[in-house]
Image (cartoon, rainbow, N blue to C red):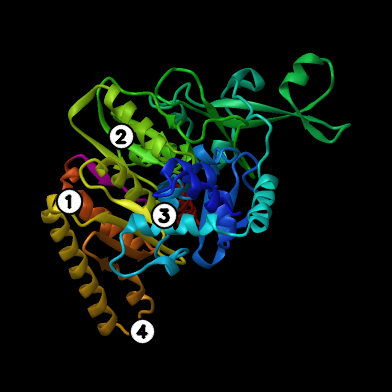
């Protein structure tokens, strides 16, 4: 007897959604449909990849199917329960279940029913593979007592990144950066935990000084994690809350600008570039998301912004890296701010592509019509440019595809800065969020690269 037969006896009309969630694990379903575990990652939370669709997902609450949720790595908007997992992949992984005119929810249920009908021996194999991915040990709690933190040393790693001392000691960053000491036991040839060092203070160790940036969640003044940096070292301390915490600079009496960047070094670099251009006003707050962006981090940043005293003309500047990932972060940030007014959600649309879908609702028809007209105009411009400059390769790959049905509209675009930037700008303008939110990009990949290139140019001219 299959699991479907068993549940169908209890619920002959329709199996409740919660029962489906409890009996179909996202991990099992993913493995069954071609996802492969990335065993070198996700010791606490399994990570799986579908190579054909360039789809990498992370699983939370992996031990309990009823509480399981997933998140697509690098795109927090593609996340949720097993229902969301299937819904966002109806055009890719589960496309064989799609039938013209069929209700979306019925299609999702059919996918889950079909899995419940799979031979029990095959399901047992899937569960065995799942159990091997899950580490059952408790997640280590973060505690500052586990780290030797000291005031930032004068000679530190930031100097090798061309960050000036006056920037480090500026009102924005003074006392916001620390030195973290790592202890190395030469006899054992390994790094020693600080707790063990305190227990044997006379034991000889080799000391290494790293730069540490504290992370906060905006709910308390407690440090929730540490980003540790040095040459060849770019990591978060064990137990750090990476999902909901951010690095934040000291707030001014009245903030005029808020800058959101991918790294704390970029935040320092941005401040230095302003200083080099004659702007030394203490008027901005800097946030770093640690090379990622999650929905919880967006909430944390907005929580801080709401709590800080602001000038009447305050603005938010999204200053993520000037590359496709940075432009995707811009779009994700805006998407979350718009979610209550315009329910845009991420969907899987194929290899090396980014997809967003929204309901084709009458209530949003003026917004939708204007957005679609803008996309059609953008596509027309790109197509004309490809005809005028046939030698310019790749232009036609910058198009945004529109798939429209009676119930839903899906936008599909390449993981490329051009279409991502265009869609972000369009959403900002149509929602009028552009009155408060700006996109602030570096000339090079990031603001630290801008500083480095500026220093090298000056050096060359000196010769």
SS assignment at label 2: strand
Crowd rating for badge 4 (residues with CA inside 10 Å; few <14, some 14–19, many 20+): few
Q: Is residue 457 above or below residue 261?
A: below
Q: Looking at the rendering, in which quadrant would you find the N terminus?
A: bottom right
Q: Give the image location of residue 96, x and y in percent.
A: 44, 69
Do tag 4 and tag 2 residues touch (Cβ < 8 Å)? no
Do tag 3 and tag 4 residues touch (Cβ < 8 Å)? no
Q: Is residue 32 above or below residue 166?
A: below
| Mark toward the start of the polypeptide (1 vs 2) | 2
| Mark toward the start of the polypeptide (3 vs 4) | 3
Instruction: Name the one closer to the observer, 361 or 353.
Output: 361
From the image, tell me which residue sits under label 1.
Answer: 429
Do tag 3 and tag 1 residues touch (Cβ < 8 Å)? no
User: Magenta residues?
Assistant: 436-442
Q: CA distance from mark 3 to mark 1?
A: 38 Å
Instruction: Name the one closer to the observer, 33 or 452.
Output: 33
Q: CA distance from mark 4 to mark 2?
A: 41 Å
Residue 238 among those drawn in magenta: no
Question: Is 364 positioned to the left or the right of 308 in the image?
Answer: left
Question: Is 48 positioned to the left or the right of 208 in the image?
Answer: left
Crowd rating for badge 3 (residues with CA inside 10 Å; few <14, some 14–19, many 20+): some
From the image, tell me which residue sits under label 2.
Answer: 258
Q: Quadrant of residue 411?
A: bottom left
Indicate which label's residue lies in the foreground, 3 or 2: 3
From the image, tell me which residue sits under label 3.
Answer: 109
Mark linked to residue 391: 4
């Amino acid at each position: 007897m299959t699991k479907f037969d068993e549940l169908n006896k209890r619920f002959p009309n329709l199996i409740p959604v919660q029962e489906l969630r409890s009996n179909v694990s996202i991990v099992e379903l993913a493995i069954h449909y071609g996802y492969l575990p990335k065993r070198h990652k996700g010791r606490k939370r399994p990570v799986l990849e579908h190579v054909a669709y360039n789809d990498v997902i992370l699983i939370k609450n992996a031990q309990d199917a009823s509480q399981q949720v997933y998140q697509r790595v690098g795109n927090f908007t593609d996340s949720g329960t097993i229902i969301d997992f299937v819904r966002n992949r109806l055009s890719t992984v589960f496309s064989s279940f799609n039938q013209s005119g069929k209700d979306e929810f019925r299609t999702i249920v059919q996918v889950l029913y079909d899995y419940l009908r799979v031979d029990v021996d095959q399901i047992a194999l899937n569960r065995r593979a799942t159990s091997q991915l899950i580490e059952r040990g408790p997640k280590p709690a973060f505690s500052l007592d586990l780290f030797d933190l000291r005031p930032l040393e004068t000679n530190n790693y930031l100097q090798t990144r061309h960050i000036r001392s006056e920037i480090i000691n500026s009102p924005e960053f003074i006392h916001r950066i620390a030195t973290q000491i790592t202890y190395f036991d030469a006899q054992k040839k390994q790094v020693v935990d600080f707790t063990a060092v305190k227990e044997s203070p006379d034991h000889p160790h080799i000391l290494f000084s790293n730069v540490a940036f504290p992370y906060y969640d905006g709910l308390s003044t407690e440090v929730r994690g540490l980003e540790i940096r040095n040459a060849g070292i770019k990591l978060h301390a064990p137990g750090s809350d990476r999902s909901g915490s951010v690095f934040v600079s000291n707030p001014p009496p009245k903030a005029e600008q808020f800058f959101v960047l991918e790294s704390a070094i970029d935040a320092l670099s941005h401040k230095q570039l302003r200083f080099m251009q004659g702007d030394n006003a203490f008027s901005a707050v800097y946030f770093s998301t640690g090379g990622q962006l999650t929905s919880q981090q967006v909430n944390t940043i907005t929580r801080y912004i709401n709590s800080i005293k602001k000038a009447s003309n305050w603005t938010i500047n999204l200053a993520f890296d000037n590359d496709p990932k940075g432009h995707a972060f811009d779009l994700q940030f805006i998407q979350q701010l718009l979610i209550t007014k315009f329910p845009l959600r991420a969907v899987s649309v194929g290899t090396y592509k980014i997809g967003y879908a929204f309901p084709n609702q009458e209530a949003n028809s003026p917004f939708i019509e204007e957005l679609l007209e803008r996309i059609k105009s953008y596509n027309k411009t790109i197509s004309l440019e490809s005809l005028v400059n046939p030698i310019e390769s790749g232009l036609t790959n910058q198009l945004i595809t529109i798939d429209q049905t009676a119930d839903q509209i899906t936008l599909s675009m390449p993981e490329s800065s051009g279409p991502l930037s265009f869609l972000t700008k369009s959403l900002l303008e149509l929602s009028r969020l552009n009155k408060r939110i700006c996109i602030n990009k570096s000339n090079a990949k990031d603001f630290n690269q801008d500083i480095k290139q500026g220093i090298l140019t000056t050096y060359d001219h000196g010769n």
